[in-house]
Amino acid sequence: MISSLLVANRGEIACRVFRTCHELGIRTVAVYSDADEDALHARVADTAVRLPGASPAETYLRGELIVKAAVAAGADAVHPGYGFLSENAGFARAVLDAGLVWVGPSPEAIEAMASKTRAKELMSAAGVPLLAPLDPEAVTEADLPVLVKAAAGGGGRGMRIVRELAGLKGELSAASAEAESAFGDGSVFVEPYVEHARHVEVQIVADGHGTVWALGTRDCSLQRRHQKVIEEAPAPGLGPDVERRLYAAATAAARTIAYTGAGTVEFLVSGDGDGVGETRVHFLEMNTRLQVEHPVTEAVFGVDLVALQLRVAEGAALESDPPAPSGHAIEARLYAEDPSRDWAPQTGTLHRLSVPGVRLDTGYGDGDTIGVHYDAMLAKAVAHAPTRAEAIRRLAGALERATIHGPVTNRDLLVRSLRHEEFTAARMDTAFYERHLADLTAPAPDPYAPLAAALADAHGRSRFGGWRNLPSQPQSRRYLVAGEEHEVHYRHTRQGPAADGVHVVRAGPGLVVLEAGGVRRKYEVARHGDHVFVNGTTLTALPRFPAPEADHAPGSLLAPMPGTVVRIAEGLTTGSPVQAGDPLIWLEAMKMEHRISAPTAGTVSALHVSPGQQVDVGTLLAVVL
């Protein structure tokens, strides 16, 4: 029996595993980097061990340090979570060699699926349908589009869609460089890219006694940069024949490598999806770990997958048949990012996070800092209901009512995605955001939010704690909302504050009630520094008399986010000619890589950064004239 468990991870998944451990009476051990010294997972664990350093390479990717921490803290088991070393066979062996229980599949099973190219060979031999890799040197126009993929790792890193043959060589190099940086392995391969396909996966749980459960399907088609955004269980509209084929392929994959524990087999599903034979199923990969989206399966099947992982690791046998499913569950990943600015990650203080009425898995607490070193995911919101339509409505409503005071998030995108006609009709595919991102991110702020912010702010700043009882001159305030400046006007009267065309029913520092056109609306207002949060709208208070802006030369390229310069375009120096759109500099922030491209054709007149350099938002990177 496991009595004390170390989670070799951080953030949301560490907190998730600790929650089950505490319910089972298992003591918990956290590891934390210097950047995570005050992180939630380090606070909720019974014991915590420091990993000196801040970057993943210095800390959470140092298997020998983690094993040493487990031994020092008296843990008798290690759970890898997801990401980092969760699919590293060498780390699993090191845990076992130290006499500890490894909560996961055998190192041999991990090794068999660690390389996507090797995994495809094994699955082909087992009769699992898949997309055959292409020889990069032999790709022709007829093969396009193709997908370049990293052989190791996951999470969308080292993946590129290529639609023009002339771009293949450059994308192979770019994908290889990103894979080397992310996984320490620059191996890549090429396979056909299936247009308008769905990403469907099967949850597997297997014990050491020959029982393999296929715990239903999940649809994870809504993705950005090949990373999942919204997931649901079961995958809608597949038909019984397609489900049987998916279950058979998934269980065959598990049995082929003698898999134990929880894992996921991922597929591309294309065609009509009516279950009569037109639908094509292609094996993608097997993730030999718990998935981020595991809560939707837990909700539908009424199980705790972490508890099942622990039971299997202790040698227990599963029941012969899995529990029966019930209802539908949908999960949305809440990211600190700006979808309207190429998904740029955001940093800063998360003052308040609350999503009412649904399950919320998070690694952050109120007041925590969102830094640059790790993934931009703040939380996962999960809704379960008897039907898909009810689950969609419940999750969209909960996100819409959520209180999120902090950096920009993708909350509005999630709400709009859930209510989009393609999603509600289950007609989505992996290109959903390629088609609809512009519409889904179009600014639509509440026109009265700036006035509510101004009234609340004025009340809070009043010297007497309330409104003056004498008329005064008109007042004005300026706010930045979704990149646009808004100026609002109001005045004080003997009856209270007033504004043209709007009846101010109530105005306090935290609550403003306005009536316009016969409709009364409530606005909850909170201010943190220059940022004002009004219901779901974030405003930035601007000074009454703007200070002169720092001058930048025309053609200046500024860092859109804090991060690390990971690459400079080959041969790029001061004086290099460039064309509009040429990628010049690559920044890595929060596990995502971002290209900084030339805004116009011209010449690089200045280059201020080099690989490995840390930059802040607004840092001058280069100048193109």
Image (cartoon, helix red, strand yellow):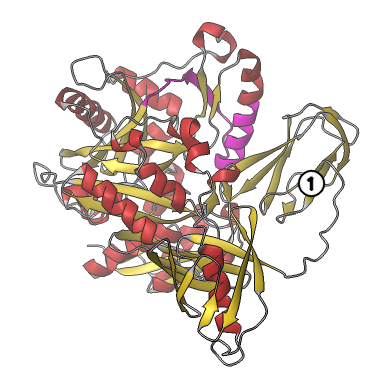
- Location of the C terminus (image quadrant): top right
Residue 117, quarter of picture:
top left
Vertical position of residue 307 compared to residue 367: above or below: above
**Residue identifier under label 1:** 621
Depth check: 503 or 221 in front? 503
Query: As rendered, which of 352 and 8 lies closer to the eye?
Result: 352
Asked if residue 52 can be seen in this view, the reply is no
Report the side of 319 relative to 458 (left or right): left
Give the quadrant of residue 576. top right
Q: Position of residue 383 (x, y in %)?
A: 27, 53
Displayed quadrant of residue 531: bottom right
Task: Give me the residue at 64% from left, 19% from top.
Answer: 167
Element carrying mark 1: strand
Residue type marked 1: Leu
- Left or right of residue 82, residue 202 in this image: left
- In the picture as drawn, the residue positioned furthest to the bottom comes out as 464
Q: Say above or below: 191 vs 198.
A: above
Viewer-nearest residue: 113 or 208 = 113
Write down the region rendered in magenta. Answer: 172-197
Q: How many marks?
A: 1
Q: Is residue 196 magenta?
A: yes
**Mark 1 Cα shell of 10 Å, populated few (<14), some (14-19), many (≥20):** some
**Residue 361 lies in magenta, yes or no?**
no
Horizontally, residue 31 falls left or right of residue 331, namely right
- Left or right, residue 402 beside residue 435: left
Residue 184: x %, y % from top left: 58, 39
Residue in the picture at 58% in, 66% down: 34
Report x, y in % for residue 36.
53, 66
